[in-house]
Image: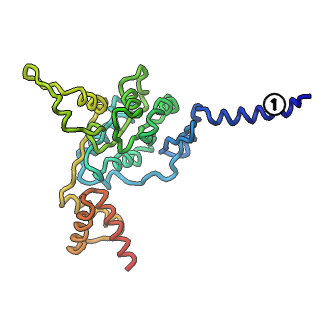
Amino acid sequence: MTDWGDFLARAERLVERVEHLLPGAAEPPDWAAAVAFRWRRSGARAHLQPVARPHAIRLDDLHDIDAQKALVEQNTRQFLAGRPANNVLLTGARGTGKSSLVKGLLNAHARRGLRLIEVDKDDLMDLPDIIELVQGRSERFILFCDDLSFEASEPGYKALKSVLDGSVAALPDNVLIYATSNRRHLMPEYHDENLQTRHVDGEIHPGEAIEEKISLSERFGLWISFYPFSQDEYLEIVAHWLRAFGLRGRMSEATRQQALQWALTRGSRSGRVAWQFARDHAGRRGAD
């Protein structure tokens, strides 16, 4: 005789195991727990993970990118005020403050309702699910995609392209996308693609490969470029971070040469390299 109680218990356990493997709608997080979140995926399920300790960089810590800073902050202020604002693409030299600028905006405007959600490139297919979680809320959300670079065949490329300006569903008023990349058009560019360019009646018509690469970046309303720092700009940033780490007074000639040597060994005079040198130098001084 069949033991129906045992059978039903086993069936329930089986259903629970199968449900865990099936994709399900993400549950809203505790919105009061943080001002920054990461989209995290585990198997078929995903969720927004609160970031307990967001990066504490301030906008005033970012030197020699005043023009870029002003443009992005103005756009963000428009967004927070409920006025029209653009999705933003920050491109250019590595270590020049692209990501730090977005984090600084959060620290500057979190009290006004700004929230940041970091989305990895591999999870861009989930953008519609993230948008569904936040639309209708009073907070203003920046979906932050850092260090993007695609091949045309990648699913995340098409997903981002669709969400920006290709889907029948528009972005809600409380969502913008800010992305950073070392590539202006987010994709590698090859010399032979320029050979496809045609001249028709004096006009230049790019080839299909170039058109496809431009088609994603042009969907961002605001393009902002970042450039390598000069030696003087680099040293100015070093001096700022030395002061931030508690080393007051004028930078000595020996420290100046050490900072330049540090940059030389890393092949870059960037804000990131300046911060790393100052951190190391302050640590060594504290150990003396």
Answer whether residue 125 is visible to the viewer in this image. yes
Give left or right: position of 160 versus 45.
left
Q: Is mark 1 on a helix, strand or loop?
A: helix
Give left or right: position of 77 versus 205.
right
Characterize the local packing of mark 1: few (<14), some (14-19) or many (20 or more) Cα atoms within 10 angstroms.
Answer: few
Up-down: is 86 above or below 167? Answer: below
Answer whether residue 112 is visible to the viewer in this image. no
Quadrant of residue 85 within the rendered picture: top left
Q: Which residue is drawn at 66% across and 33% down?
A: 19
Q: Toward the viewer: 217 or 288?
A: 217
Give left or right: position of 269 versus 173.
left
Up-down: is 58 above or below 274? Answer: above
Up-down: is 269 above or below 44? Answer: below
Q: Which residue is drawn at 55% across and 43% down?
A: 32
x and y, in percent, of residue 74 in the image: 30, 39
Q: Which residue is drawn at 39% across and 48% down?
A: 103
Label 1 belongs to which residue? Answer: 8
x and y, in percent, of residue 285 in the image: 35, 75
x and y, in percent, of residue 177 in the image: 38, 35
Q: Residue at x 28, y 56 (%)?
A: 271
Q: Toward the viewer: 65 or 24?
A: 24
Quadrant of residue 152 within the rendered picture: top left
Quadrant of residue 179 within the rendered picture: top left
User: Disc 1 residue type?
Assistant: Leu
**Which quadrant is home to the C terminus?**
bottom left
Residue extending farthest to the bottom is 288
Residue extending farthest to the right is 1
x and y, in percent, of residue 98 in the image: 31, 47
Up-down: is 176 above or below 201? Answer: below
Q: Which colour scheme is used?
A: rainbow
Give left or right: position of 152 versus 227.
right
**Which quadrant is home to the N terminus?**
top right
